[in-house]
Image (spheres, coloured by chain):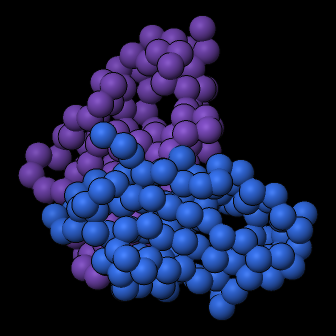
Chain colours: A purple, B blue
Amino acid sequence: AQSVTQLDSQVPVFEEAPVELRCNYSSSVSVYLFWYVQYPNQGLQLLLKYLSGSTLVKGINGFEAEFNKSQTSFHLRKPSVHISDTAEYFCAAETQGGSEKLVFGKGTKLTVNP
Amino acid sequence: GAGVSQTPSNKVTEKGKYVELRCDPISGHTALYWYRQSLGQGPEFLIYFQGTGAADDSGLPNDRFFAVRPEGSVSTLKIQRTERGDSAVYLCASRVSGGHNEQFFGPGTRLTVL
């Protein structure tokens, strides 16, 4: 069965600093990977996704992620964060065939301080 | 256009009571998913509809949980004999079928069982 591990439950950073949110997945087959953001009292919003092709994926709001098959990782990065990036971030893997449901990590709370 | 909507936004009930949670997907989205997000956790899959039929209900925790989608659009998640452990945010998502298309999430219904 697929599983997704987000290594940090909370990440505090200062405004304009770079940030990396870590995600590892476990699967014996090819995967499709996603990062979602959840702002307080809002639904999940897709930041970016990896399906195939280039391992560096660019998303909205200046975020990017790199798929690394050998390390089974899909870490999310942003070179300079803003206060408005404060939110919960979820890494997810889509199951293959059938329902194509998402398996989520436990989330990483990013707090950007002034 | 309109996104996925869920009603009510908040539901407080007493242990043992019956509740219904409603999801209105994006028009034209044939695939619909229900997830449950407990405090401090990522969303967990409950059930998947393709059209009117439940194609995958492997995530339903027990037979107190049931969902329907009689006309292939609106879906209702039904919970009988609620327990305190059912307290969570219930998320609905819809998508265009196939092609690993993005799942669009609603804002969720926060269920509290007293």
Q: Residue at x 55, y 26 (%)?
A: A86
Report the front residue among B36 and B107. Answer: B107
Q: Residue at x 39, y 16 (%)?
A: A80
Determine if residue A3 is in view. no
Q: Position of residue A70 (x, y in %)?
A: 25, 59
The quarter of the picture where residue B82 lies is bottom right
Q: Position of residue A92 (x, y in %)?
A: 41, 57
Q: Position of residue A3 (x, y in %)?
A: 45, 69
Farthest residue, direction left:
A53
Farthest residue, direction bottom:
B63
Q: Residue at x 76, y 63 (%)?
A: B87
The quarter of the picture where residue B21 lies is bottom right
Determine if residue B65 is in view. yes
Residue B58 vertical position relative to residue B17 in the rendered view, above or below: below
Q: How many discs appear?
A: 0
Q: Position of residue A27 (x, y in %)?
A: 34, 72
Q: Residue at x 54, y 47 (%)?
A: B107
* Left or right relative to A106: residue A78: left
- Indicate the quadrant containing the N terminus of chain B: top left, top right, bottom left or bottom right: top left
